Image: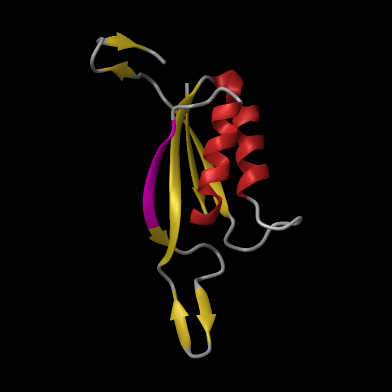
Amino acid sequence: MLLIRAIIRPSQTNIVFSELMSAGFPAVTKLDVYGRGKQKGLKVGEVIYDEIPKDMLLMVIRDEDKDDVVKIIMKYARTGENGNYGDGRIFISPVEEAYTISTKKAGL
């Protein structure tokens, strides 16, 4: 199992959710987060914005679904044809175990 953490623009969240659902990946958790990437924030005139609002999507998936999920997020989280700074990042980590609380079952 893998944990996908995708930090994306809030404006792209609904389309990413919709496309993941259509592809058979309905289990997604969304968190409102704030931060900055490699561009060190955004400067408008003399004001620097370094706490930019983003959404973090969390998903636990089977290893074999990684490429499909990453392709969906990359395609629908990107703004413009070539993408733009601030479109986000995807982080992938292994998950050793997962349990459903109500049924006490292990796994996905």
Position of residue 53 relative to residue 5, above or below, is below
Residue 64's x, y, as percent?
60, 19
Q: Residue placed at 54% from the left, 29% from the top? A: 21
Q: Residue placed at 30% from the left, 17% from the top? A: 99
Residue 107's x, y, as percent?
39, 13
Magenta highlight: main SS: strand
Q: Residue placed at 64% from the left, 28% from the top? A: 68
Q: In this view, does 43 lie to the left or right of 32?
A: right
Position of residue 82 relative to residue 103, above or below, is below
Residue 78's x, y, as percent?
65, 52
Quadrant of the drawing holding the C terminus: top left
Q: Residue placed at 49% from the left, 54% from the top? A: 10
Magenta stretch in the rendered image: 28-33
In magenta stretch: residue 30: yes
- The residue lying furthest to the bottom in this view is 46
Q: In this view, does 55 lie to the left or right of 99?
A: right
Figure coloring: secondary structure
Query: In the picture, residue 24 is in which quadrant?
Result: top right
Position of residue 75 relative to residue 64, above or below, is below
Residue 19's x, y, as percent?
60, 35
In magenta stretch: residue 32: yes
Of 91 and 102, which appears nearest the observer? Answer: 102
